[in-house]
Image: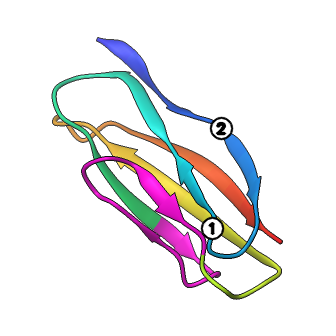
Amino acid sequence: IVPMILSPATAQVLTTEDRQFTAYGGFGTYTYALDVNESGGSIDSMTGVYTAGVTTPATDVIEVTDAQGNTATSTVTVV
């Protein structure tokens, strides 16, 4: 099994901006979630498309989990 990576590892976005996050490695299907959600944003659990919320400044943390429970994270700064 290849180690999990979530790309991009960090990002800076504007409020309500969309950003695609993509998982690599691990095993099986991926599930995306917001581990920390200071901006009030959202993420599509299947596709990894993140939409920043309206609260700034904020830091959100995206976590992806594979079918065996392995995880990787990315940090998003909302400005």
Left or right placement of residue 27 versus residue 36 in this view: left
Mark 1 lies on residue: 60
Whether residue 38 appears in magenta in the rendering, the answer is yes
> Which label sits on residue 9?
2
Left or right placement of residue 54 versus residue 58 in this view: left
Image height of 5 relative to 61, above or below: above
For the point 24% across and 41% down, which residue is it?
69
Question: Amino acid type of disc 2?
Answer: Ala
Image height of 62 relative to 9, above or below: below
Where does the image place residue 50, in percent across and percent down from the top left?
A: 49, 59
Where does the image place residue 39, in percent across and percent down from the top left?
A: 64, 81
Q: Are marks 2 and 1 in contact (CB under 8 Å)?
A: no
Q: Secondary structure at mark 1?
A: strand
Left or right placement of residue 78 versus residue 49 in this view: right
Where does the image place residue 21, in percent across and percent down from the top left?
A: 50, 42
Q: Answer with the quarter of the image where residue 42 lies.
A: bottom left
